[in-house]
Image: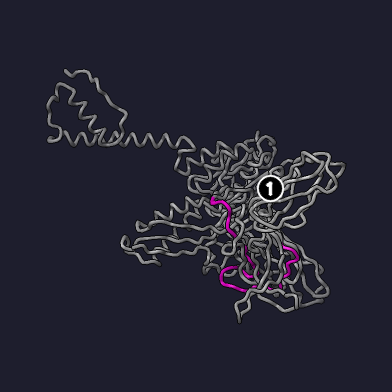
Amino acid sequence: MATSNTVLRISELDFDTIKINLRDYLRSQNQFTEYDFEGSGFNILLDILAYNTHYMAYYLNMVGNEMFLDSAILRNSVVSHAKHLNYVPTSTRASTAVVDVVVEDTSPTSGQAVITLPSYSKFQSQQIDGVNYTFVNLDTQVASKNVITNTYTFSNVTISQGEPVTYNVTVDATNTRRRFRIPDANIDTSTLIVSVINSSVDSTRNTFVLSDDATELDSNSKVYFLEETDDYNYNIYFGDGSIGKNLSDDNIVALRYLSTDGESSNKANSFTFISQLGSFSNVVVNSVSAAAGGASRDSIDKIKFIAPKFYTTQNRAVTKDDYGTLLLKDYPNIEAISVWGGEENDPVVYGKIYVSMKPKNGYVITDIEKDRIINELITNRNILTVIPEIVDPEYLYLRFDMTVNYDSTLTSKDEEQLKELIRTDIGEYNDVELEKFNSTYRSSKLQSSINDVDPSFLGVDITTIVQKRLEPTLNESKNYTIDFNVPLNRGTFADRLYTYPSFQVLDNEGVSRDALIEETPLSYTGIDSVEVLNSGSGYSDSPIVTITGDGSGAKARAVVVNGKIISIEVDVTGSNYTAAVVSISDTTGVGATATAILSGQIGTLRSYYVQVATGEKIIINENIGQIVYTTGRINLYNFKPISITTNANYASGIITFNALPKENTIHPLRNRLLSIDSNDPIAIQIRMENEA
């Protein structure tokens, strides 16, 4: 007879442990005492039992995972959970461009005062990676004739990429759930137009709109609902007669939408009109803004991230987080987004909400796209008293000058191969750690990452350079403000702020020079001002103010009113001060104290050119601007470049300002994006020092 088991273990779930537990259980029975399980056919039976147990445990574990949004890995499970949160995954989105369409009337006597550009007229883009994409206008446009030029101009026509698709399905009694599958995984659901025709003999047509708030629906509301299916398609369905209008048998559901290629057509910027426009044959398409906004359908990770937040927003924008959630859902071209209130802005502006977005392609969103986002995606959801404003990201580019010490005997790679590994590692650091609005740059983290690139590396010394880019107006004298928004190091003769490339300006004699801007070395070493801490009492009209410290030459005088020192004016700033003490002496007065404010907070910028023949540096303007070290703000005065030298490193018309940050850690700030520009060939300078 079997004895009772006292060591029943069920917590282990891996195959080997399950088999051991089964064997130990059998050995605890009298019938199998000292039985050789490993050397008998029983071993195969134990394998089968262990496999079956392990298989069932894994299956049940996966079933448990799929029951929750956080742990689900199957798309249909994630979509199902999101549906309970009233979130419908965003479909593929068509890229959109803006064009002007100019039609020439070659028969001026035709007498047509206006012409119409029908909806779904087709445009063809230039080739992108060998493919021409079809774009269409979704709305009908009307243009009047210009009798002087004999042309009709359709201005700012928005065209979307995709092929127009029409699909009809008849309602019958077998479809009791009134659900209709759209057989196109590439549909852009934002372009979907749903209308219901009464029957094949009654062409009366009613347009239904997508429901976004069930609380406002009644039995006659002409709305439809949308859901993603298990096979990456979408279903539309209609009301039940209580919430939303129910359909009748023999109704015909007519669908029209764009089947799009998504992000593949982004950046298209040249178009040809390929439809017929009446009898007109001379049609010219001028691009206003390149195609942008195309995106793939929501990924599983994006659904998991947005669905709970979307449920919290309830399709309205009250808090700043609501704006971010709604825009991430409805505008999938966003790679990163930052939202802050006017009370957090600099300067403070109450009653505003600021949004900054980095598109997946390019650096900024076009002005036309900004207007569309505000008008279509924000205005009907936000609080009326709050004014939304979209601002461009402020890019702060990071450049590196590094020395890598290595031992060549510990690697088979040459210096160029090692440099390429370093550049690849920095690129991965940029993708993972930077180019997000909440990114923090830490020099130590990058240094540690590079140290691990190859076993031969002995140490890495990194000098970080921050860079801002300015595109000035040519031939116009203007003031410019450039904000690094990080404290900067005060320059020395060896290391100081500089610009690149050169730009052409007129010197004092009217001669064009190839100029550059630099920080005037040691321009910050005087006494900037003296602050009165205690005005004292009983002072004569001319107390003696003495400034002592490690510099020299500073002179100041006191301003006395009614025996009190109300201010101290600096007459001579002096030089070479890093510390200074202010003392006040007088025959009658007592109690006044003051402190010196060093000029270390502000430096001077100057422009110069170099004589080609002698290499001599010639100053053009001793004071073209100033630099505030504590905030990293640069102010340029009356800057008037004639042209900017073309170079292979940066886009035409760009001047870069390069400086050393005071700290090796740069924290996130509102709309600032930290980036290592992969298109900048001089962004990463590497010196290899072989210590073998």
Q: Which residues are magenta?
A: 636-664
Residue 396 visible within the image: yes
User: Would you identify the image quadrant in which residue 366 lies?
Assistant: bottom right
User: Is 301 left, or right, of 1 in this rendering?
Assistant: right
The amino acid marked with disc number 1 is Val
| Number of numbered labels in the structure image | 1
Q: Is residue 578 above or below residue 34?
A: below
Q: Secondary structure at mark 1?
A: strand
Residue 201 visible within the image: no
User: Is 329 left, or right, of 533 in this rendering?
Assistant: left
Residue 336 among magenta residues: no
User: Is 344 left, or right, of 360 in this rendering?
Assistant: right
Percent from the top left, x then y, of residue 162? 59, 60
**Colour pattern:** one colour
Residue at left 52%, top 66%?
Answer: 682
Overall secondary structure of the magenta section = loop
For this orientation, the residue located farthest to the bottom is 613
User: Pointer 1: what residue?
Assistant: 581
Percent from the top left, x then y, of residue 379? 72, 46
